[in-house]
């Protein structure tokens, strides 16, 4: 947490999103079918949201991103069973 945020009350979503950004996450891969305050706040902080229609394609794209860029990323799917084929 940054020094200027001391004493400021943060929501859980804001705290998690800031932790992701502070740890180098620049991209999110996933199926985002509902409003999530972590995802909203992460987008406000500059994280790029890449949306997919199926868990398996999310997994393939995230795997390719990780292998080529070697940067941290967030993969979020409702059912990871479908995306496990790609890892």
Image: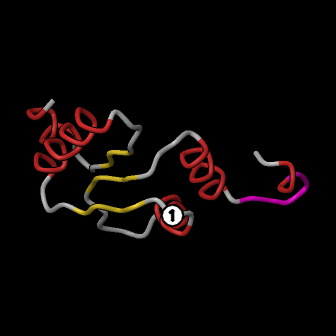
Number of numbered labels in the structure image: 1
Q: Where, by quadrant of the figure, is residue 5 drawn? A: bottom right
| 7 to 63, vertically: above or below | below
| 83 to 78, vertically: above or below | above
Q: Residue at x 27, y 49 (%)?
A: 77
Dot 1 corresponds to which residue? Answer: 46
| Position in image of residue 80 (x %, y %) | 22, 40
Mostly what secondary structure, the magenta segment?
A: loop
| Position in image of residue 48 (x %, y %) | 39, 61
Secondary structure of the residue carrying numbered label 1 = loop
Image position of 82 (left or right of 23): left
Q: Residue at x 28, y 36 (%)?
A: 66
| Position in image of residue 53 (x %, y %) | 14, 62
Highlighted magenta segment, given as a residue range: 6-10
Q: Residue at x 25, y 63 (%)?
A: 51
Image position of 20 (left or right of 2): left
């Amino acid at each position: 947490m940054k020094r200027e945020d001391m004493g400021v009350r943060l929501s859980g979503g804001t705290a998690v999103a800031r932790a992701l950004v502070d740890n180098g996450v620049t991209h999110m891969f996933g199926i985002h079918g509902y409003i999530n305050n972590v995802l909203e706040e992460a987008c406000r902080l500059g994280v790029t949201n890449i949306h997919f229609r199926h868990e398996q394609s999310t997994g393939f794209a995230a795997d390719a991103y990780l292998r080529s860029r070697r940067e941290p990323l967030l993969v979020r799917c409702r059912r990871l069973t479908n995306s496990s084929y790609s890892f």
